[in-house]
Image (spheres, helix red, strand yellow):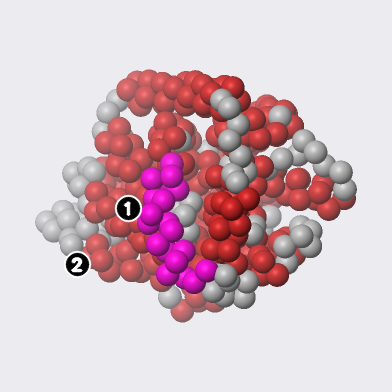
Amino acid sequence: MDTAEPAPAAGTRHVPPAARIPLLDVLRGTAILGTLATNVWLFASPLGETAPLVDAEALVDVSAVSSVDGAVEAVFRFLANGKFLALLSVLFGAGLALQYRSAERRGRRWPGTYTGRALFLLVEGAVHFTLVFAWDVLMGYAVTGLVVAWLLTRSRGVRSAVLWSAAVLHVLLMSLLTWALATAPQEESGPRDVADLTALYADGSYPEQVLFRMDNALVLRIEPVVAFALLVALFLVGVRLMRAGAFDPGASGRRMRVRMARWGLGVGLPLNLATSLGGADLFLLDRYVAAPVVAVGYIGLVGLLVDRLPGSGVVTKAVSALGRTAMTGYVAQNVLCSLLCYGFGLGLASRMSGSGPWWVLGLWAGVSLFLLVSASLWLRRFRYGPLEWLQKSVLSLTGGAGRR
């Protein structure tokens, strides 16, 4: 999530850093809010983080809406599920392309110090997984980033071959897994299992939850393993979009964003709606095949809005500030939701169980507002977010700092 350019090595000429690309910051901030829009339902579930393992419909199901409350919840879940994981992946790839361009301009070896950044992200993700949230994305991004960083040194033809091969492999894998899950004998979780998991998040202590994540790490870390080919493809899409100028403010960039919005939403939304209407049986295709197509449309749509909104507007500046502190915002939202929803904190998930979706939407809105205001106020006094500063400090001690 950190795309700051690396510092020049000793003995090399100083090259002024490139100006920030405003759209990237806004997109990162949007992705953080969108990630929360997906994860908030897990925190609000009595089953907590284990909800997707017990019931795939814990993330999205628009196949059986019977009330206004149900319709509101289904639409909110539909608009978020899987889209912002994909959007963040594309942006991470774009950030890698920026860092590679910076290293190339300075005449520095690549991946060079980026290896240290990836290892830091891997450790940070492991800590985040263990202490905060089971469905952490940072570890998967760290490993994927190392692979794509190496691919940046290969030819465009090689990267294109890897991109399309990874995409096809991913679609085939998701199709095969969907067929296997649909035809396999259904083994529902017993009442005792559900009761134990509910008690863990409603009444369990914080150390008990940490131990649960550690004991079940292989199962809870399955998403980045199953979706690895998708992550590689999306990172490479981000690289391609960055080099094609899709994030640039000029007329050429705007034309690309129009095409992205048109094709991503025009094709992705009907496809995504079809997989969502298929219910839990099509969960994998819904989240990991259709949603990434919509994510491309989201990038184009947000880009078109930014093109038309004043960059000095309150909303644009706040979302941009969150984007500049994306790593901090991502971890902070999960910490806040844990404290608000789980039994070792306020226990809202248990206390509000069965009361409908409105309190969950309020939780998302409240935490989002807190993140936007906090990021804006923080950047008035400091140049980087807390975790961004920690990363730079650690890397400076190991010779891999990135300063701007």
331 to 1, vertically: above or below: below
Amino acid type at image mark 2: Leu
What span is colored magenta in the figure?
204-222
Cα distance between the residues tagged 1 and 2: 17 Å
371 to 222, vertically: above or below: below
Is 214 magenta? The answer is yes
The percent coordinates of residue 204 (x first, y second) are 52, 69
Q: Residue at x 62, y 75 (%)?
A: 346
Amino acid type at image mark 1: Leu
Q: Quadrant of the N terminus?
A: bottom left
Which label is found at residue 122?
1
The percent coordinates of residue 122 (x first, y second) are 32, 53
The percent coordinates of residue 292 (x first, y second) are 57, 35
**Nearest to the observer: residue 199 or residue 242:** 199
Total marks shown come to: 2
Disc 2 is placed on an element classified as helix
295 lies left or right of 276: left
**Nearest to the observer: residue 309 or residue 121:** 121
**Nearest to the observer: residue 287 or residue 298:** 287
Residue 373 shows in the view: no
Query: Which numbered mark, 1 or 2, is in the foreground of this view?
Result: 1
Q: Residue at x 49, y 71 (%)?
A: 205
Q: Residue at x 86, y 43 (%)?
A: 66
Q: Residue at x 32, y 64 (%)?
A: 391
For residue 200, which quarter of the picture?
bottom right
- Which comes before the other along the chain, label 1 or label 2? 1
Q: Which residue is mark 2?
A: 397
276 lies left or right of 139: right
Furthest-left residue in this view: 11
The percent coordinates of residue 171 (x first, y second) are 51, 24
For residue 128, which quarter of the picture?
bottom left
